Amino acid sequence: MKKTSVLLLMLIPIFMINCNGGKETPADPYYVRMADSEMQRNPESWMIDFVKTIKWNYTHGLELQSILQVWEKTSDEKYFNYVENYADTMVNEDGTIKTYNLERYNIDHINPGKILFPVYKRTGNAKYLKALQLLRSQMETHPRISNGGYWHKQIYPHQVWLDGLYMACPFLAEYGQTFNEPALFDEVALQLTTAWEDLIDEETGLLYHGWDESREQRWADPVTGKSPNFWSRSIGWYMMALVDVLDFMPENHPKRNDIIDKLNKLSSTIDQYRDPETGMWYQVTNLPDREGNYPESSGSIMFIYTWVKGAQKGHLPKEFAEKGATAYNQFLKQFIRENSNGTISVTSVCSVAGLGGEKVYRDGSFEYYISEPVRDDDPKAVGPFIMTSILLDR
């Protein structure tokens, strides 16, 4: 009897820790721990991505989409409320969006619209429907290159960047399904296939970051128009676009199998560039041995997310589910840090990379890609990490 009493006394503190106001414990899954860590670091959802003032931004859309998935997984209302707070802050009653300007034709600004689908469905607030329609209207007049591909931004004329495929295509596919606009599935297929044709490198099987149809940019090859290097995160954006649009594209769409074929080809290709020691991918994908290159977390987790989701959905062979789970475990070891305050962080994230520009010209060189700042807890790694953790129930 005394032994039983002692055992119960020993268990009480453990029970209290796990029941203490929902505070994180090591027993919580990673998707909960990372979401809670981010909410602790950013008490207001507009603060995500280290911003000082409110901003309608693609990074908010990516991370808040992942937090919505935590809500769907756990049914804990605090996650939905956190996301809705951003939507409510940014969307005015007439459906206009603070800091958003359609005439800038910035394709990045379409991505945060994805969080408005579930927020509108849950709340029924008409302002979110108007905002969705506003974002949809941008893509009706968004400038294009000659084959129909979207410019990346008004300030980057005649240019297609891989990043932009993720920013627009899943949103348009979900809009097409939600509001019965089937022509949008054709549009999405056009964007994904023309980008592949414009950016593929037949020798490596990888996709270049950008393409300038005009060949006017200093970073563009004067013959091909392609940028000079392979950036892992840009390929990751494209792969996530491929796998995510398939959630909405009809089974009988004539281009569906083409998208799945591209997903398979690229999934097999990136496997060849995985670092045998860490299991991760380098900032510049195909040059792991070059001095200054480094294993980068956002591109790596985007690849892992695509593998796991693609296999679970039946788009990729089952072996990619195993590859993804193994790579996820390696990602935890390489990039996830336990902090003294009980939070967790994702490390080694390239903060930003692009092409061209006015203040500092980004020439797409190897030296450029490795020169961009590296930081912790960037949404471009946090969001895919949460979503992958949910897929694996880790």
Image (cartoon, rainbow, N blue to C red):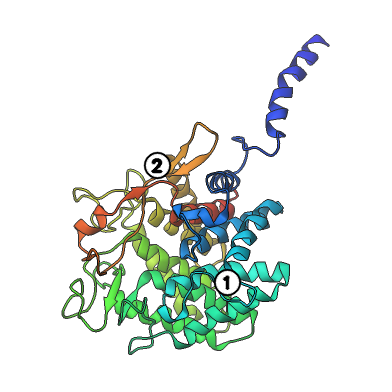
* Type of amino acid under label 2: Gln
Q: Is residue 26 shown above or below 351? A: above
Q: Nearer the viewer, residue 183 or 380?
A: 380
Quadrant where the N terminus is found in the figure? top right
Q: Which mark is residue 247?
A: 1
Q: Nearer the viewer, residue 83 or 193?
A: 83
Q: Where does residue 106 sit, x and y in percent of width and height?
A: 41, 75
Residue at position x 46%, y 82% in the image: 189
Residue at position x 28%, y 76% in the image: 211
Answer with left or right where residue 98 lies relative to residue 273.
right
Q: Where does residue 184 sit, x and y in percent of width and height?
A: 53, 85
Mark 2 lies on a secondary structure that is helix
Question: Which quadrant of the view contains residue 334?
Answer: top left
Q: Nearer the viewer, residue 91 or 186?
A: 91
Residue at position x 43%, y 40% in the image: 333
Graded by Cα atoms within 10 Å as few (under 14), some (14 to 19) or many (20 or more), the crowding at tag 2 reads: some
Q: Is residue 295 shown above or below 160? A: above
Graded by Cα atoms within 10 Å as few (under 14), some (14 to 19) or many (20 or more), the crowding at tag 1 reads: some
Which residue corresponds to mark 2? 334
Answer with left or right where residue 328 lies relative to residue 228.
right
Q: Is residue 77 shown above or below 18? A: below
Whether residue 92 is visible? yes
Question: Which quadrant of the view contains residue 205?
Answer: bottom left
Most extreme residue toward the left is 222
Most extreme residue toward the top is 2
Q: Where does residue 14 sit, x and y in percent of width and height?
A: 69, 26
Q: Where does residue 83 sit, x and y in percent of width and height?
A: 61, 59
* Type of amino acid under label 1: Asp
